[in-house]
Image (cartoon, grey):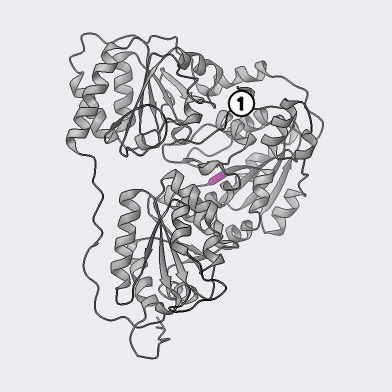
């Protein structure tokens, strides 16, 4: 392998040593956009054999790194240049912070001692995006710094931005790397925390008449779901999930599906009757609780590993699996296994058919009912696929009428309440798990924000099918204005021919605009890159927007 020696010293450069350390970390892709501040790093990564996925906008690089981390289980890494290269990532950085996603952004800083148009306070900017900032200092070894920031991202479950002065990348390395990370890990949940949490939950479950157990993202490990079902069987408790944990209890007779604004009607009726809600690994924010209205009759308690988690509920600090294990042990002598206090509602997919009767409306020619379309598409999605959904009006249909794949393969790109994140997140997810098909559902307005990244997906060889739920409008705003009684046309923004646009970027392209064309979904899900323009009727209002108005927020 040819070595670069841009300093002319005969010694290896900081960029080369950094590339070696990245390669040893096990990541298979680094996402980035080259600028004069980070170009030597990206060159060194390529020479070291680490594929660099060149994006078309820096915001996409961070979203792809997050999606890559979600599907691969590794910490996603991306790189941007200084100044505007970093400021462009604001939304995706905030999204990752709100999602508590560990990832690393290697951001160039302007050269040492330089003050120019692209110089600004990068540390303060990153802090405003709720991420950590670490500046690399002269004399530090890149391998040591990389180990430290990866440990920081992992232990604090948050994005970290590493600032490196552009001239440092080409400077020679002095000395050898130390072994191991110098980052002091945060105080972890203790065994006493787990036991205290378990004792409290045991007392509450023993005294409750109508308990519900809710699993969030933090309960999606290998053992917590089975222990939650064991507790449900013991206490006759209903089971539900937050949106990110959708499908976790599919097949269990006590499963109610998603809790909150995206609950199906039958599940919501049970949830409203609960007198105790025990949430594990979930923040219990406004979306899951319908701004606290859903559980007005219940005592709500949550077990989280970070007391800074958002939401209003009694909060217990504990590791999900350890707390559940202790709870099962403490309640093993429960005299009798209780029957369910509610009438089981059946599979979520069947429950959602009730919505077709609750809200029926004419569908104009040239469009399809999004509920019918998604149910039909769902039947063709491979069982082992990764599924990503976006935010906005279309997300209510996707969350309802899609069947979640196996645990850890369903992702909602909704952090920070942003639209426009699903496509880019899904590209990263596809590259993080190339052995599986990745399928993404996004609205037309959101898709147009990053449509250029189809080029990135094509160049990277992503096995990705993009279903664009195309209502020719800013969907949520259109529906809310319509509900308010006027000016809905202000939110109508016709999209171009999305199938033709996809084809221009090298994707197989299809248009679904009638029930007869729904069968095209099966063809679109073949291996490779595909874009499907699903022309949906604006006359169909999703159930979550038929609920009393609230400001939705995604939940863990």
Above or below 83: residue 203: above
- Residue 166 image offset from top left, x and y in percent: 45, 76
Residue 230 appears left or right of 391: left
Above or below 385: residue 159: below
Dot 1: what SS? loop
- The residue shown at (35%, 72%) is 20
The main secondary structure of the magenta stretch is loop
- Asked if residue 19 shows in the view, the reply is yes
**Quadrant placement of the C terminus:** top left
- The residue shown at (69%, 45%) is 445
- Residue 169 image offset from top left, x and y in percent: 41, 77
Residue 542 appears left or right of 104: right
- The residue shown at (65%, 40%) is 521
List the single residue furthest toward the right: 365
| Count of numbered circles in the view | 1
Magenta segment boundaries in residue numbering:
435-439
- Magenta-span inclusion, residue 274: no
- Residue 278 image offset from top left, x and y in percent: 35, 23
Q: Residues within 10 Å of mark 1 (few under 14, many from 20)?
A: few
Q: Which residue is label 1 attached to?
A: 549
Which residue occupies the foreground of this view, 228 or 63? 63
- Asked if residue 435 shows in the view, the reply is no
**Quadrant placement of the N terminus:** bottom left
Residue 342 appears left or right of 525: left
- Residue 189 image offset from top left, x and y in percent: 24, 40
Above or below 3: residue 500: above
Choose top left, top right, bottom left or bottom right for residue 299: top left
Which residue occupies the foreground of this view, 371 or 424? 424
Residue 485 appears left or right of 505: right
Above or below 208: residue 509: below
- The residue shown at (75%, 21%) is 361
């Amino acid at each position: 392998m040819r070595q670069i020696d841009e300093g002319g010293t005969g010694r290896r450069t900081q960029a080369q040593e950094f590339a070696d350390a990245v390669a040893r970390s096990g990541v298979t892709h680094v996402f980035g956009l080259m600028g004069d501040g980070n170009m030597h790093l990206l060159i060194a990564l390529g020479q070291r054999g680490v594929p660099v996925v060149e994006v078309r906008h820096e915001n996409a690089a961070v979203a792809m790194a997050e999606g890559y981390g979600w599907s691969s289980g590794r910490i996603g890494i991306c790189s941007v240049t200084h100044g505007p290269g970093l400021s462009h990532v604001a939304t995706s950085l905030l999204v990752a912070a709100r999602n508590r996603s560990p990832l690393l952004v290697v951001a160039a800083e302007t050269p040492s001692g330089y003050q120019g148009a692209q110089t600004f306070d990068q540390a303060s900017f990153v802090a405003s995006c709720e991420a950590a900032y670490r500046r690399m200092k002269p004399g530090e070894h890149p391998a040591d710094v990389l180990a430290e920031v990866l440990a920081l991202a992992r232990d604090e479950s948050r994005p970290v931005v590493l600032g490196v002065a552009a001239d440092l990348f080409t400077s020679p390395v002095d000395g050898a790397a130390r072994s191991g990370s110098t980052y002091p890990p945060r105080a972890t949940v203790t065994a006493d925390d787990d036991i205290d949490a378990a004792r409290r939950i045991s007392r509450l479950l023993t005294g409750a008449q109508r308990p519900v157990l809710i699993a969030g993202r933090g309960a999606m490990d290998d053992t917590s779901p089975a222990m939650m079902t064991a507790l449900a069987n013991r206490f006759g408790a209903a089971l539900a999930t937050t949106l990110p944990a959708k499908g976790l209890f599919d097949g269990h007779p006590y499963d109610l599906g998603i809790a909150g604004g995206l609950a199906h009607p039958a599940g919501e009726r049970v949830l409203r009757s609960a007198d105790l809600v025990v949430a594990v690994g979930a923040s219990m924010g406004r979306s899951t609780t319908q701004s606290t209205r859903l559980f007005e009759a219940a005592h709500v308690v949550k077990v989280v590993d970070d007391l800074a988690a958002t939401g209003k509920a009694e909060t217990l600090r504990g590791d999900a699996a350890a707390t559940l294990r202790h709870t099962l042990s403490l309640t093993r002598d429960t005299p009798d296994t209780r029957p369910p206090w509610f009438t089981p509602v059946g599979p979520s997919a069947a429950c959602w058919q009730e919505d077709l009767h609750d809200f029926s409306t004419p569908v104009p020619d040239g469009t399809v009912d999004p509920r019918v379309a998604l149910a039909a598409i769902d039947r063709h999605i491979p069982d082992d696929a990764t599924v990503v959904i976006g935010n906005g009006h279309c997300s209510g249909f996707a969350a309802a009428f899609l069947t979640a794949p196996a645990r850890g393969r369903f992702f909602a790109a909704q952090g920070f309440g942003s639209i426009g994140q699903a496509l880019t997140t899904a590209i990263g997810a596809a590259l993080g798990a190339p052995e599986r098909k990745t399928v993404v559902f996004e609205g037309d307005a959101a898709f147009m924000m990053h449509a250029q990244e189809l080029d990135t997906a094509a160049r990277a060889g992503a096995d990705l099918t993009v279903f664009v739920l195309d209502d020719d409008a800013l969907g949520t705003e259109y529906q809310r204005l319509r509900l308010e009684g006027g000016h809905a046309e202000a939110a109508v923004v016709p999209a171009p021919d999305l199938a033709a646009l996809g084809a221009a970027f090298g994707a197989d392209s299809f248009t679904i605009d009638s029930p007869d064309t729904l069968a095209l979904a099966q063809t679109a899900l073949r291996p490779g890159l595909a874009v499907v323009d699903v022309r949906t009727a604006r006359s169909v209002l999703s159930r979550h927007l038929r609920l009393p108005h609230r400001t939705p927020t995604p939940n863990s």
